[in-house]
Amino acid sequence: MATREHFRVAVIGTGFGGLGAGVRLRREGVTDFVILERADSVGGTWRDNSYPGCACDVPSHLYSFSFAPNPDWPRAFSGQPHIRAYLERVTDIFGLRPHIRFNSEVEEARWDEEARHWRLRTARGELTADVVVSATGPLSDPRIPDIKGLETFPGKVFHSSRWDHDYDLKGKRVAMVGTGASAIQIVPAIQPRVDRLTVVQRTPPWVMPRMDRGINAAEKWLHAKVPASHKARRGLLWLIREFQVGAFVRRPQLMKATEQIARAHIRRAVKDPVLRAKVTPDYTIGCKRILLSNDYYPALAAPNTEVVDAGLTEVRGSTIVTADGTEREVDAIVFGTGFHVTDMPIGDRIHGVGGRTLAEHWKDGMAALRGSTIDGFPNLVMIIGPNTGLGNSSMILMIESSLNYLADYLATLESTGAAALNARPEAVRSWNAELQRRMERTVWNTGGCVSWYLDASGRNTTLWPGTTAEFRRATQRLKPQEYEVLRAPAERTGSSEASAEVAA
Ligand SMILES: Cc1cc2nc3c(=O)[nH]c(=O)nc-3n(C[C@H](O)[C@H](O)[C@H](O)COP(=O)(O)OP(=O)(O)OC[C@H]3O[C@@H](n4cnc5c(N)ncnc54)[C@H](O)[C@@H]3O)c2cc1C
């Protein structure tokens, strides 16, 4: 029988999460690890999303690793090519390339109860690992709605995260389906080039002015020469966002002042009362992600743009039909319809104790302990798992907190000599009961909108209802009493002795 390669840790994904995990593992002295990536380069989100206008919407000096400051960010909100290049540099500077296997999609990860490790089947062969770190990203697998007749469309169809750069939109009649974070960056970028732009809107977003500007040479010089200045800038950006959290989670009524700014933003750019009414949301600001743009509304008001405030229901040949019954002929359909967030495909591929998939385990909603571990899935650690998303700040802060937890998880395995740790179901339950209790008052649950934050049953299993500092504290140390210990096979004398408390 061919022997499989074995690793202490197998990381899945090379976005901020997977690369961050690689850096952290090396810092903790773990070198026996592999990073498996389905694509042929690093970058995750920032490799896949190359649509015109793609940029971060959290300032770059905060939307980057604390351990890899970049004094050279060109703009307050830098574009995708710069973020992707940053991640390529992080890969090289921290010596991660030898650990990465590209074109190695993880097709299955199965917990081997006898051997007490994971067996992974990838597109390029099989391997085993003591610990699997899943960093497959919450916004990684594009979602295109099931539209009747779409397969008959003779023109071009693509998703915002799989942009076809070989297809020239110049002079074309284009339908942009969706008005979320990607769409509002795409619309102003393509509107001047296309012949006709039809924006198919189900629900309008609240859009705030974007305080973007170029970072000047003096600032870059200062950040490079005086690292404390970079730290101070980052600290300030972080602090402002920490203070905003209260309004999102405890006092949604405080969002009213923000709403006034957003209303004025619409009034300034949109003079036509019919269009104004169409683009003004009827739910509390913050309920869906607040978007930032200075050129979205002007692009909607341009003579070659039409906003249809009814969802896409059908495609008949080259005609799109919307819920209001109207029809338009188009050459291309671009879907800015988001991702599989609460039904992530990796869920069908990870099999825990008893062969149960994560998707089956989560059929009533995603739930993890401290956004990281799941009962029945020993030695599986997620980077930004359920309820770690943010409405207003940088996900890199949450990723770095998840990495603290991962480091302590591995240290606990070492110090206890355990083969594996399995989150106790009651620990997962109580963590999530408290999360859902805190969620009740949030603007995401009470603001009167339907958003991708909520799963099919209306539970918010995506966002973190607190500050990033709170999450950092919650993930600083693993609480031994929240886990059962699984011993290595050789140490077992009988199944009843297979588990024990971790020594506190
Ligand atoms: C357009 C866009 C803009 C965004 N802007 C911001 C922002 O401004 N601020 C912010 O905080 N957040 C933003 N986000 C959220 C963003 O997703 C996170 O900030 C962060 O990049 C997530 O990193 P990640 O490593 O967890 O996931 P990803 O970057 O999605 O990386 C996941 C990786 O896993 C790989 N993978 C998935 N499945 C498998 C498999 N089965 N086998 C092998 N490899 C696999 C993927 O190919 C990918 O490389 C944005 C998201 C999008 C889509």
Image (cartoon, rainbow, N blue to C red):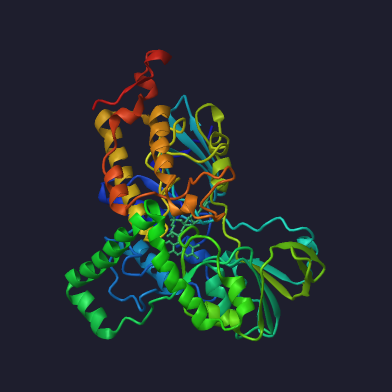
- Can you say whether 479 is above or below 392 in the image? above
**Quarter of the figure with the C terminus:** top left
Please state if 173 lies on the left or on the right of 389 as rendered: right
Quadrant hosting residue 449: bottom right
- Residue 207 seen in the current view: yes
| Identity of the residue drawn at 33% across and 30% down | 482
Residue in front for this viewpoint, 304 or 264? 264
Residue in front for this viewpoint, 116 or 408? 408
Q: Position of residue 377 (x, y in %)?
A: 46, 33
Q: Residue furthest right?
A: 317
- Can you say whether 433 is above or below 207 in the image? above
Residue in front for this viewpoint, 403 or 331? 331
Quadrant hosting residue 171: bottom right
Quadrant hosting residue 186: bottom right
Q: Position of residue 390 (x, y in %)?
A: 41, 56
- Residue 51 seen in the current view: no
**Quarter of the figure with the N terminus:** top right
Residue in front for this viewpoint, 290 or 93? 290
| Identity of the residue drawn at 37% across and 46% down | 33
- Can you say whether 270 is above or below 287 in the image? below
Q: Position of residue 113 (x, y in %)?
A: 47, 26
Q: Position of residue 404 (x, y in %)?
A: 29, 47
| Identity of the residue drawn at 26% across and 47% down | 28
